[in-house]
C-alpha cells in the first residue's frame, strides 16, 4: 500500500527553528536605494548638440541672399491611391517649359493624357540619337542617365541617377523635333508616367495659349548668372591701358525666406498631495519635469529633421539631392555627396544606414577608421564624423537617407534658431510656467520649447536619398 505524503505542518515541525532574523523580515526596517525614473526614448540627439544656436530676439530669422534666377528643375509629386498613380496637374509647372503657366484646365487635360508604364531593371527607356517623342515622369524607381563624356566616346558613361519625381524629355514640347542626348536605362523596377508628343499636340491644338507660352519660354534669353544660378557680378580682368570697366552691383532677393520660431508644448499635471508628501528622497516635480523636457527635446530634434516647413529632409535644394547608384550607400556615393559642398562637417544617418555603409566598405576591402568627436569614438568617412540620428525615417522598402551638413553663420551653413531670456525660462529657449491649481487640487505647468533651423546657403545641406539598408549579401539583380 502506497505511503501518504506528510502534511505541511508536519514538515514544518521537522525543520530546525531559525536562530536569526530572516532577510525578508529585515527588509521591512531597511532603506531601499532607488534610481531616478529611466526613459527608453532618450537618444543621443546629436543634431541638437552640433548645431550652432543663434539668438532670434524677434522670433523670426530672415535669410538674405543674392538674387537667384529660378530654372524649372523641380520634382514632381503624384497622387497615389493604392496602386493607382495619377499626375497632379499643377505639378506639371515644375517642367521648365511649363513654369508659370497658370491655365488649370489645360494642365488638367495634359495630366489626363499621361500613360502609366512599368519597366523591368535593365530596360532602355530612351536611346541616344533616337527621336525624342515623349515626356517621361519617374513615379517610382531609379533610372541611370548614360552617354559619352569629354574623355570617351563610349555611350555608357554615367551622368547621374534619376529617381522618383524626376523627369526628362521636356525638349519634345517645343516646335522642332529633337533627339535624345542621353540613354536612359532602368536600374530598378520603375513606374513611369509617359506623355507622347502626339497627345501633347492634341491638347496644344485646342489651347493656343499653351503653344504661345512654351514658344516664349524657349525663346526667352537666359539672364546672366554664375554657376550657382545667382545674378552675375560683372568683373573685368587681364586688361591693359585704360579700357572702360563694367558697371555692376550685387542684386538681392526681393522676398527672402523667413524662419519663424516653432514651438513644442505640453501641460504637465500633478496632484498637490503627490507634490507635498512624496518628495523624499527625490523631488516629484523635478523628476516629472525632467522626463517631460526629455520628451520635448526628442520632439524638437524630430521636427528639425522631418518638419515639412523647415526640416532638413524637406528643405534641401534639389541640386543637393542625389541617389545611390546601386542600392546601398557605397564609398562612391559618399564621395559624391562629400564633393558637393565645401567644409562638410558632419554626416547624420540612422544607425542601420551607418551599418549598411560599413558593410559596403568591408565588401570593397576598405578600412574606414573612426574618429574622436566630443569625447566619443564615432564612425567616420574621409575624416568627417558619421553621427547617428534615429529621427531620420526608414521607409517600408527599407530605404533611408544620409544628411551632409556644413554648419555655422561664418561658413554660411546650417544654424539652429532659438530665443533665450524668455519669461519663466527653465533651460535655454524652454520655459516652465505655473498655470494654477484647479478644483481637483491638480497643479498644471505649461512646458514650452521654441526652436527652428535655417539653411543659409543651399550648398550647406545635402541629402543622399534612397539608400537601401536591407542587403546583407552579394546577390544583386542590377543591370
Image (cartoon, rainbow, N blue to C red):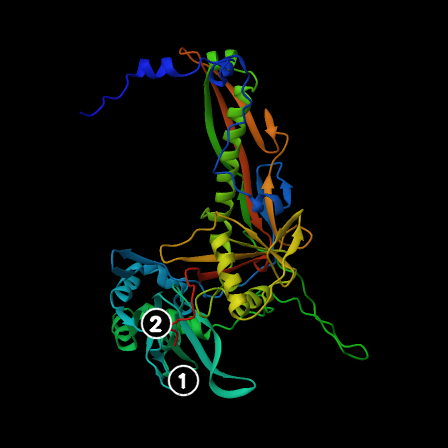
On screen, 43 above or below 14? below
Residue drawn at point x = 42 percent, y = 74 percent: 144
- First in residue order: circle 1 vs circle 2: 1
Q: Is residue 51 among what the camera can see?
A: no
The one of 196 and 208 positioned closer to us in this rendering: 196
Mark number for residue 369?
A: none
Q: Is residue 280 above or below residue 161?
A: above
Report the side of 340 relative to 104 (left or right). right
The quadrant of the image that shows the N terminus is top left
Q: Nearer the viewer, residue 64 or 236?
A: 64
Quadrant hosting residue 161? bottom left
Q: Position of residue 311 (x, y in %)?
A: 49, 48
Residue 247, x across and y down, in percent: 70, 67
**Viewer-closest of 103 and 181:** 181
What is the quadrant of residue 271 in the picture? top left
Q: Residues within 10 Å of mark 1 (few under 14, many from 20)?
A: some
Q: Give the side of residue 111 with respect to residue 55, left or right.
A: left
* Residue linked to disc 1: 128
| Dot 2 alpha-carbon crowd within 10 angstroms: few under 14, some 14 to 19, many 20 or more | many
Extreme residue toward the right, this view:
241
- The single residue placed furthest to the bottom in the displayed view is 153
Label 2, on which residue? 136
> Measured from the top left, where is residue 151 in percent x and y?
56, 86
Residue 66 visible in the displayed image: yes
Tag 2 secondary structure:
strand
Mark 1 to mark 2 CA distance (whole Å):
15 Å
As drawn, 449 above or below 197: above
Which residue: 53% across, 61% down? 358
Amino acid at each position: 500500500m502506497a505511503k501518504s505524503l506528510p502534511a505541511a505542518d508536519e514538515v514544518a515541525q521537522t525543520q530546525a527553528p531559525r536562530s536569526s532574523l530572516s532577510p525578508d523580515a529585515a527588509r521591512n526596517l531597511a532603506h531601499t536605494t532607488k534610481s531616478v525614473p529611466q526613459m527608453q526614448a532618450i537618444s543621443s540627439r546629436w543634431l541638437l548638440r552640433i548645431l550652432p544656436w543663434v539668438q532670434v530676439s524677434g522670433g523670426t530669422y530672415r535669410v538674405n541672399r543674392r538674387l537667384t534666377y529660378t530654372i524649372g528643375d523641380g520634382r514632381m509629386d503624384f497622387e497615389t491611391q493604392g496602386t493607382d498613380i495619377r499626375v497632379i496637374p499643377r505639378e506639371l509647372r515644375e517642367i521648365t517649359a511649363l513654369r508659370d503657366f497658370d491655365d488649370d484646365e489645360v494642365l488638367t487635360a495634359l495630366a489626363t493624357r499621361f500613360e502609366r508604364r512599368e519597366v523591368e531593371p535593365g530596360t532602355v527607356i530612351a536611346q541616344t540619337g533616337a527621336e525624342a517623342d515623349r515626356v517621361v515622369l519617374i513615379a517610382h524607381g531609379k533610372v541611370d542617365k548614360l552617354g559619352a563624356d569629354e574623355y570617351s566616346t563610349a555611350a555608357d558613361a554615367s551622368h547621374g541617377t534619376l529617381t522618383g519625381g524626376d523627369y526628362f524629355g521636356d525638349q519634345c514640347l517645343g516646335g522642332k523635333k529633337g533627339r535624345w542626348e542621353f540613354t536612359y536605362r532602368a536600374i530598378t523596377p520603375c513606374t513611369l508616367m509617359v506623355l507622347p508628343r502626339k497627345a501633347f499636340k492634341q491638347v496644344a491644338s485646342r489651347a493656343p495659349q499653351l503653344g504661345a507660352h512654351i514658344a516664349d519660354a524657349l525663346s526667352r534669353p537666359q539672364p546672366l548668372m554664375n554657376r550657382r544660378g545667382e545674378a552675375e557680378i560683372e568683373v573685368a580682368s587681364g586688361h591693359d591701358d585704360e579700357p572702360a570697366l563694367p558697371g555692376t552691383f550685387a542684386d538681392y532677393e526681393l522676398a527672402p525666406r523667413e524662419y519663424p520660431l516653432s514651438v513644442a508644448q505640453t501641460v504637465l499635471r500633478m496632484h498637490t498631495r503627490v507634490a507635498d508628501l512624496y518628495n523624499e528622497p527625490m523631488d516629484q516635480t523635478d523628476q516629472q519635469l525632467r522626463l517631460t523636457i526629455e520628451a520635448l527635446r526628442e520632439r524638437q530634434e524630430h521636427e528639425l529633421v522631418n518638419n515639412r516647413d523647415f526640416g532638413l529632409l524637406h528643405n534641401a535644394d534639389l541640386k543637393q539631392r542625389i541617389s545611390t547608384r546601386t542600392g546601398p550607400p557605397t564609398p562612391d556615393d559618399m564621395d559624391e555627396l562629400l564633393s558637393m559642398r565645401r567644409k562638410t562637417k558632419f554626416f547624420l544617418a540612422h544607425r542601420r544606414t551607418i551599418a549598411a555603409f560599413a558593410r559596403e566598405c568591408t565588401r570593397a576591402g576598405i578600412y574606414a577608421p573612426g574618429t574622436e568627436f566630443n569625447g566619443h569614438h564615432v564612425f567616420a568617412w574621409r575624416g568627417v564624423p558619421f553621427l547617428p540620428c534615429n529621427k531620420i525615417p526608414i521607409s517600408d522598402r527599407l530605404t533611408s537617407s544620409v544628411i551632409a551638413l556644413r554648419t555655422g553663420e561664418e561658413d554660411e551653413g546650417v544654424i539652429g534658431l532659438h530665443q533665450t531670456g524668455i519669461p519663466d525660462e527653465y533651460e535655454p529657449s524652454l520655459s516652465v510656467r505655473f498655470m494654477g491649481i484647479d478644483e481637483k487640487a491638480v497643479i498644471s505647468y505649461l512646458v514650452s520649447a521654441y526652436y527652428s533651423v535655417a539653411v543659409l546657403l543651399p550648398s550647406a545641406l545635402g541629402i543622399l536619398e534612397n539608400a537601401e539598408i536591407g542587403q546583407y549579401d552579394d546577390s544583386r539583380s542590377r543591370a
